[in-house]
Image (cartoon, rainbow, N blue to C red):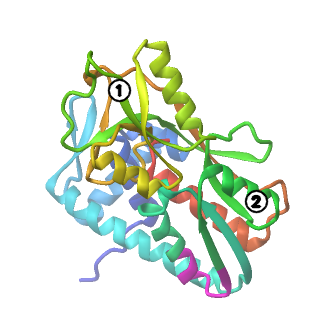
């Protein structure tokens, strides 16, 4: 007996429903009616011959067959998308020069960039990792074509990607942070740095004394200084090494603002290759960051 072909659109909806924990929210996300989404789920259940979802409070949870399908669904859809991108991308050519801050240079984004390079063999990809401000300066000088940066959402070329909360960061084994007998030791970037400004402003507003114990121009150096116990810092939780952890109000530290993550193209017209790269970055951000 011939096995049925799984519905690719239904698989995508299934993934979204699992991520959001609700068929209603999935329907809103993909722009379909709740009844259409429910029908897709029923179709999947008929094709696999097993129930995939069950009620859990006000949300949904996966059944054991649903968990199994989820693992396969990701692989099926990834392979489907890779085939299409490889075939379509073979016609793209040229060069793209992309800049990103160190926060995203060791996590999900390099994987996405590597995938872009493999599926678009005719495109030469150049990647630069620097501080946010330095990247935008290079973009304005015409040395880069596209930049992912935090804290520059007021630029006219800013395309919003995600809103990320700032957080205090200390060693993974950190216990008590504040000492009433001494100022708080800080490890910070050299100025100019909007994280530095935000942190000092928050401490001053909370009347918490501080001192600069460690300053650097390198993110890796900053992480090393914090892990060594030279001082706490602030950043987003993106790309946080396992030697560090987020701190907050439970340690007596003041709340911090959010920071906007945006793509910047310098206001110049994008080539087909650059437009495709922008799409890949946006899709990867949507899959890996809280939007």
Percent of width and height locating residue 187: 41, 40
Residue bearing the label numbered 2: 139
| Label 2 or label 1, whichever comes before in sequence order | 2
Query: How many residues crowd around disc 2 within 10 Å: few (fewer than 14), some, or many (20 or more)?
Result: many
Where is 8 relative to 54, above or below?
below
Q: Does the magenta stretch include residue 108?
A: no
- Residue 139's image quarter? bottom right
Disc 2 versus disc 1: nearer the observer: 1
Percent of width and height locating residue 192: 63, 41
Looking at the image, residue 59 sits to the left or right of residue 175; the answer is: right
User: Between 274 and 155, which is closer to the camera in this rendering?
Assistant: 155
| Region in magenta | 115-124
Q: Which dot marks residue 241?
A: none
Residue bearing the label numbered 1: 184
- Residue 68's image quarter? bottom left
Percent of width and height locating residue 183: 35, 23
Looking at the image, residue 203 sits to the left or right of residue 1; the answer is: right
Looking at the image, residue 162 sits to the left or right of residue 78; the answer is: right
Q: Does the magenta stretch include residue 122?
A: yes
Secondary structure of the residue carrying numbered label 2:
helix
Q: Quadrant of the N terminus?
A: bottom left
Q: Residue at left 50%, top 73%? A: 81
Q: Residue at left 64%, top 78%? A: 125
Badge 2 vs badge 1, beta-carbon distance below 8 Å: no
Disc 2 from disc 1: Cα separation: 37 Å
Query: How many residues crowd around disc 1 within 10 Å: few (fewer than 14), some, or many (20 or more)?
Result: some
User: Between 43 and 61, which is closer to the camera in this rendering?
Assistant: 61
Secondary structure of the residue carrying numbered label 1:
strand
User: Between 231 and 134, which is closer to the camera in this rendering?
Assistant: 231
Q: Residue at left 58%, top 64%? A: 280
Looking at the image, residue 270 sits to the left or right of residue 18; the answer is: right
Let me know if residue 257 appears in the view: no
């Amino acid at each position: 007996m011939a096995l049925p072909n799984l519905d690719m659109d239904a698989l995508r909806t299934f993934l979204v429903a699992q991520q959001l924990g609700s068929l209603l929210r999935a329907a809103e996300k993909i722009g379909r009616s709740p009844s259409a989404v429910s029908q897709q789920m029923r179709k999947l259940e008929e094709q696999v011959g097993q129930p995939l979802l069950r009620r859990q409070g006000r949300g949904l949870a996966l059944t054991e067959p649903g968990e199994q399908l989820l693992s396969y669904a990701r692989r099926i859809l990834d392979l489907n998308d890779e085939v299409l991108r490889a075939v379509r991308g073979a016609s793209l050519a040229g060069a793209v020069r992309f800049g990103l801050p160190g926060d995203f240079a060791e996590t999900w984004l390099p994987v996405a960039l590597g995938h872009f390079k493999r599926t678009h063999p005719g495109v030469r990809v150049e990647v630069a990792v620097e501080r946010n401000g330095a990247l935008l300066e290079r973009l304005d000088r015409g040395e880069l074509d596209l930049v992912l940066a935090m804290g520059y959402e007021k630029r006219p070329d800013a395309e919003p990607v995600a809103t990320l909360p700032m957080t205090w960061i200390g060693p993974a084994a950190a216990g008590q942070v504040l000492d009433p007998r001494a100022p708080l030791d800080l490890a910070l970037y050299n100025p100019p740095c909007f994280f530095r400004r935000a942190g000092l402003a928050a401490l001053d507003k909370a009347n918490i004394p501080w001192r600069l114990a460690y300053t650097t121009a390198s993110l890796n150096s900053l992480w090393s200084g914090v892990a060594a116990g030279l001082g706490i810092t602030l950043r987003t939780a993106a790309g946080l090494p396992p030697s560090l952890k987020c701190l907050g109000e439970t340690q007596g530290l003041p709340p911090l603002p959010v920071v906007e993550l945006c793509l910047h193209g310098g206001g110049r017209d994008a080539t087909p290759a650059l437009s495709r790269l922008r799409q890949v970055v946006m899709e990867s951000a949507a899959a890996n960051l809280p939007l």
